[in-house]
Image (cartoon, helix red, strand yellow):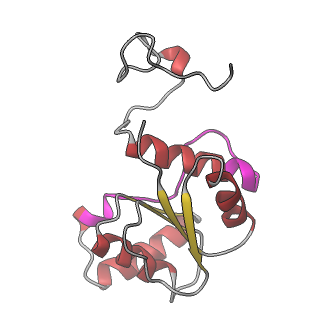
Amino acid sequence: MADPCTLHVVGDGPVAEALIALAGPLGWSVSTSTDDPGVPDGVDALVVTSHHDGVDGPAIRAGLDAGTAYIGGMGSRRTQDRRRAWLLGDGVTEEQLASVRAPIGLDIGANEPGEIAVAILAEVIATRAGRTELGSVSDREGPIHPDLAPGDAYCPGG
């Protein structure tokens, strides 16, 4: 089992609220900020829901500078283009930008804030697990938990 994640959410609103609420049952620790683009030490995942020029680009830059394992930014393609221009103009390289997930979240058809939060958290989980080719478990051959010996998996359903 992976170590619990430390998640930092930059921004506010319904998706940020859902992220905070859903991270708790995962056993993750969460920190937040609405207007401070800094990233606390030891953060595993940075999720930027802010769409403010003075916050979102600088927060992503801070996450890159800190070596944060997962960095993602919410927003439209136009918002992503604006952030990208800011980041490139502020010394971020194309190679660094390639590690930023934006738009954020797995493509599961999410529309409502809670669904969007699930898609984002699922992408964080997949990234931390090194899963780059995602799909349904039913589409995959072999054991459900390939990293565990047969019989070692815990089923929380009973």
How many numbered callouts? Answer: 0
Q: Tell which of 141 and 39 is nearer to you.
A: 39
Give coordinates of residue 116: x percent, y percent. 66, 51
Q: Write the start and end of the magenta stretch as one range.
A: 96-116
Quadrant where the image shows the N terminus:
top left
Give coordinates of residue 26: x percent, y percent. 59, 46
* Residue at the spot 54% in from the left edge and 61% down from the top edge: 29
Q: In this rendering, is residue 122 above or below 146?
A: below
Give coordinates of residue 123: x percent, y percent. 50, 46
Residue 111 appears in the rendering: no
Q: Tell which of 64 and 80 is nearer to you.
A: 64
* Residue at the spot 59% in from the left edge and 69% down from the top edge: 49
**Image-quadrant location for residue 16:** bottom right
**Image-quadrant location for residue 39:** bottom left
Residue 97 magenta? yes
- Answer with left or right where residue 2 lies relative to residue 52: left
- Answer with left or right where residue 68 lies relative to residue 13: left
Quadrant where the image shows the C terminus:
top right
Q: Label the magenta part by its dominant secondary structure.
A: loop
- Answer with left or right where residue 20 lies relative to residue 70: right
Q: Tell which of 45 and 54 is nearer to you.
A: 45
Residue 63 appears in the rendering: yes
**Image-quadrant location for residue 109:** top right
* Residue at the spot 52% in from the left edge and 56% down from the top edge: 104
* Residue at the spot 59% in from the left edge and 21% down from the top edge: 155
Give coordinates of residue 117: x percent, y percent. 65, 53
Residue 111 magenta? yes
